Image (cartoon, grey):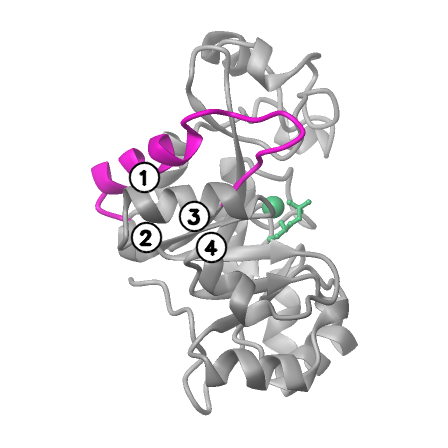
Amino acid sequence: MAYALLRQPGAAVGCVGHRGAKGHAPENTLASFNRGYEIGVLAVETDVHLSKDGELIAIHDHTVDRTTNGHGFVKDLTLAELKQLDAGSWFDPQFAGEQVPTLRELLAWAVDRVPVAIEIKNGPIYYPGIAGKVIDLLREFAMLDKAIVISFDHLVLREAKLIEPKLVTGILYVGGLVDPVAAARLAGAASINPHWAYITPALVQEAHAAGIAVSAWNPNDLPTIRMLAHMGVDSIGSDFPDLFAQI
Ligand code: G3P
Ligand code: CA
């Protein structure tokens, strides 16, 4: 299933399952991605870092401390060390034994199920070559049209587009940009991905007039989701994808 970036007229707003379904299961685990998929999300979102031995790892923080029983920076741990960690018990004992997935494992699971939004976590720790590694994996799984690569680091998105012009990207940001369409174009992005609080009807109109999609992150309450849907945003990230059944 291709990634539907722009909402079709009359279609419901798309839900991007934030870190899978972060409100229901331990974030960025296969249990969480599967929960989002079962709910029927447009895409599952994940965050990627590089391990010490250069493997793409699906995890939000630069360290494993908050979301596993381990300690230390992802960049200082090997894949084998990361695989020893329990990434589920901190959330609920029923998820004991959930592993930190690699992006490879996530794509292998997702390829016949659901598109993926991959957030490259560059800064303050930078991962040289991470864009190329993400693209290599998307090519390997033939998922270039089933994924979007997003980042707060617009430079890495520009680098990614130079490596693979067919890649679809979106600029993440927090705040009111003077010219968000220009910012997207400078990065080569097809989507603007602002924090929801900075989305206005005028911004949505401006982006759509330029052929650029708008994807909000990450409201977790129904009134805000409804308000954004009414403004015409194309998709909305949320920890609670189940809420979208009510709009
Ligand atoms: O989808 C964007 C959103 O995930 C960005 O914030 O901190 O949850 O990665 P964060
Ligand atoms: Ca993210």
As shown in the figure, which amino acid type bears the numbered disc 3? Answer: Arg
Residue located 62% across and 19% down the image: 86
- Specify the segment rendered in magenta: 119-143
Q: Is residue 246 visible?
A: yes
Secondary structure of the residue carrying numbered label 3: helix
Mark 2 or 4, nearer chain start: 2
Q: Are marks 4 and 3 in contact (CB under 8 Å)?
A: yes
Label annotation for residue 158 = 3
Tag 1: amino acid: Ile
Q: Earlier in the sequence, mark 3 or mark 2?
A: 3
The residues bearing labels 1 and 2 have C-alpha atoms spaced at a distance of 8 Å
Res. 5 image quadrant: bottom left
Q: Are marks 3 and 2 in contact (CB under 8 Å)?
A: no
Characterize the local packing of mark 2: few (<14), some (14-19) or many (20 or more) Cα atoms within 10 angstroms: many
* In the rendered image, the vertical position of residue 168 relative to residue 102, given as above or below: below
The reply to whether callout 2 and callout 4 are in contact (CB within 8 Å) is no
Q: Are marks 1 and 2 in contact (CB under 8 Å)?
A: yes
Among the 4 quarters of the image, the one containing residue 115: bottom left
Q: In percent of the image, x 32 and y 55: which residue is there?
A: 146
Quick check: is the Cβ at mark 3 less than 8 Å away from ligand 1? no
Residue 187: which disc? Answer: 4
* First-in-chain label (1 vs 4): 1
Which secondary structure lies at badge 4?
Answer: helix
Foreground tag (1 vs 4): 4
Give coordinates of residue 37: x percent, y percent.
Answer: 46, 55
- The image quarter in which residue 19 lies: top right
